[in-house]
Amino acid sequence: MFKKFGRKKSGSDNEKSTTGVSTNGSPGAMSVSGGNTVFRVTVPDNVSPGEEFQVYAGSRIVRVRCPPDSRPGQSLQITVPADPVTAPPPPQHQASPGSGGVAGGPPGPGGPPPPDSSNVRKINDPNNRGGAAAYMVTIPEGVRGGHQFPVTIAGQQLMVTCPQNARPGMSVRIVPPPPPEGTDLTRGPQGPMGGNGAGSSKPKDDKTQLFEVEVPTGVMPGQPFALLAGGVRVLVTCPSNASPGQRIRFKLPLAITQKPKPTNEAAQIKLSYDKDGWQRTIRVSDMKFQWIRLDDSGDVDTNTRFHVQKSAYVRKLEFRPGDDPRIRTGLLTLVPASDAVVDSKIKSADNRDLVTYSDIANAQVKAFEEKAQWFQDTCAQLCVEWNEGHMRMNVRRQFLLGDSVDAVMSLSRKDLRKLWRFEFIGEMGIDAGGLAREWFQLVTEEIFDPDMGLWQSSAANQMCMEINPASEYCCEDHLVYYRFLGRVMGKALFDRQLVAGHMVQHLYKHILGWPVNFGDLEMVDEEYYNNLKQLETMAKDGEDIEMLCLDFTTTQEVMGTKEEIELIRDGANIEVTNENFPEYMEACLKYRMLDRVKPQLNELLLGFFDVIPEPLLTIFDFQELELLMCGMPVIDMDDWKEHTEYSGEYDDIGGDHQSCQWFWEVVTEFDQEMKARLLQFVTGTSGVPSRGFGVLQGNDGNIRKFTVHGVALGVCLYPRAHTCFNRIDLPMYESRADLQEKLKLAVTMVATGFDIE
């Protein structure tokens, strides 16, 4: 089987034609312990289409015929049967050398279970009657806090996480989980975390509760309406044979009506308030999540025409099979938020319900750290079992990005959920976690580098990166790199790694499938946003928009050349009038928020969802997703205070003003999550410049220090942010308690209204 990539492989011109990824000195990805092995090979010089050449594949030499549309220097993928293995005689009185290693594993069904590892000692506790046995495990050399190492205990191959305060030679006490019921102990590890762990199959509670409700006035057959059922807002569609005033019945799983209470203050605020009227609710007909907006009377807003304050849109990604079964294609569009739905359950590899609505509802009300832990535990259940194989990723440091793209893009979606072990060719070192962290850091740094041409600094925030609309002119096969980055970002989340690049806010919303509205445009292009606001004011005042001679086009500058873009079909021939002005505003919003980078974003999302199931993300808001992907920032409070400026009502007294003193007292008491959310609220990102707050930049690229701007209490009730200037408008509150309440509410309500109610 062959797969050709159009990008020429990085490497030296004199590279031998017998290079294959199976040898330690050759770049690429190799599946270990699988039925077939995938190799990446390079077409040698002087080989023409149709000619054959030889390469090493494992311990064998195979002949490969150059495809008709390939040329020297291009990379091919070949799939060959795994090398035949002669089973060695079973060990008599020592641990199996293959236990927990890269290759090899336990004997097949029917054979004796492998012995315990040499660093494992069972604890003999006479008081433990019928309980689970405990073991002492000695931490091997080279393992540090947070790293994992394999052991074999009672026939199971497990991965043990070294405690943060432990070191090699110390012993830790563990209680291995029992094997799944009906499972032979000789099957080997039950998952990357060892045992059945969090992935144990438990019968889901399918009990339901019956509700009866009266169809509201004004609701027509087939029209949805929202209501509270057991304290949970659900969306019900009026049956075709029902009418207002009639009573209808429906059932809900009992787990939905027994939703737990929020465990942290941020979640409580989100569940108690909403913003812009948009809420994510559950649709009774198929138990899928759907966005709804409630009007002033509490009914579902069914208005479909664009409204600046009320309308919102969600990206919709339809997956489609590709020519290569490993590479899906998709159709990306921006649809009204009420038309966007997402599943509320996830199936495991054996088609059982791994995650249901009740699991998501339980996780959604947790604190951020607990959410992250639940997310990682679920990813561990989705990870391919160790005995099904893992991936060995061989890359050359001097050709890191090219080798990495070749390796990652050759993988199937199943391979992306296997454990990856990295090797930098020519360097000593075993990947116990450190090499993986370095790889994710270096690869994402390089691909987010503006010099690469794929990303550029946002005009509104120099610390945030946005997709370069002209990437096709800067980078050959640019879409391959976006698909690659999507896979890397998804794999980073899957494996608890970090990404070295903060993106603009609306891209996190697109990943989550959250609504974007007209207000989001200000953080993308403030000047463009203000121009459209002026047009809106003119239309409201009754001025004739037609006199401006506008049409449904916009201008985009590419490589110094201006190009006219039609916002809708035949837009150059459609004049903007007061009558069609809402449609013009809608077209402008859709173009700037998605359409101008649709091909690139389409590939980025396809790559991301090759690894992460979309329902798993419904527990996070866009601020939390940035923290999860980029890590919690290290904030120096003294540096933050020292490089803060004061303006407005605080201009004369500065930090000595009572409100400013209260402000810093409250912020200092914030935990790391709330401090990071405050940064996101004011600057648009949780990132802190490497040289500190003294070099914080604004949208013009100049130094714009964090600014506390004083306003009278009558001007605004809550603090408000101006991310283009890194400024927070802080009313002069009469008490510290009032300031604390309003500040927490403002910071958290940035993402409020887009959560499960």
Image (spheres, rainbow, N blue to C red):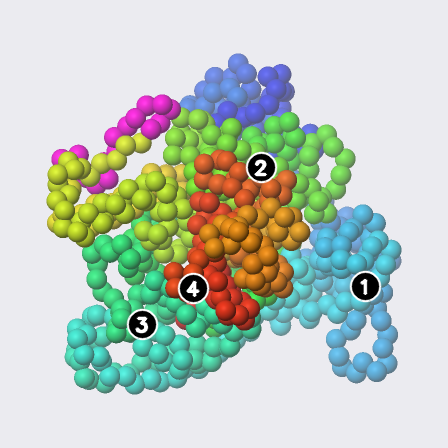
Q: Earlier in the sequence, mark 3 or mark 1?
A: 1
Residue 354: give x, y in percent of width and height.
51, 66
Check contact, mark 4 vs mark 1: CB within 8 A.
no
Q: Earlier in the sequence, mark 2 or mark 4?
A: 2
Is residue 34 visible in the rendered structure shown here?
Answer: no
Q: Which residues are magenta?
A: 557-574
Q: Which residue is mark 2?
A: 445
Q: Amino acid at mark 2?
A: Glu
Q: Secondary structure at mark 4?
A: loop
Q: Which of the two marks, 4 or 3, is nearer to us in this view?
A: 4
Task: Give the crowd class for mark 3: few <14, some 14-19, many >=20 residues within 10 Å.
Answer: many
Q: Which residue is mark 3?
A: 235
Q: Amino acid at mark 4?
A: Leu
Q: Earlier in the sequence, mark 4 or mark 1?
A: 1
Q: CA distance from mark 3 to mark 2?
A: 44 Å
Residue 593: give x, y in percent of width and height.
35, 45
Q: Earlier in the sequence, mark 4 or mark 3?
A: 3
Residue 164: give x, y in percent of width and height.
76, 57
Check contact, mark 4 vs mark 3: CB within 8 A.
no
Q: Which residue is mark 4?
A: 713
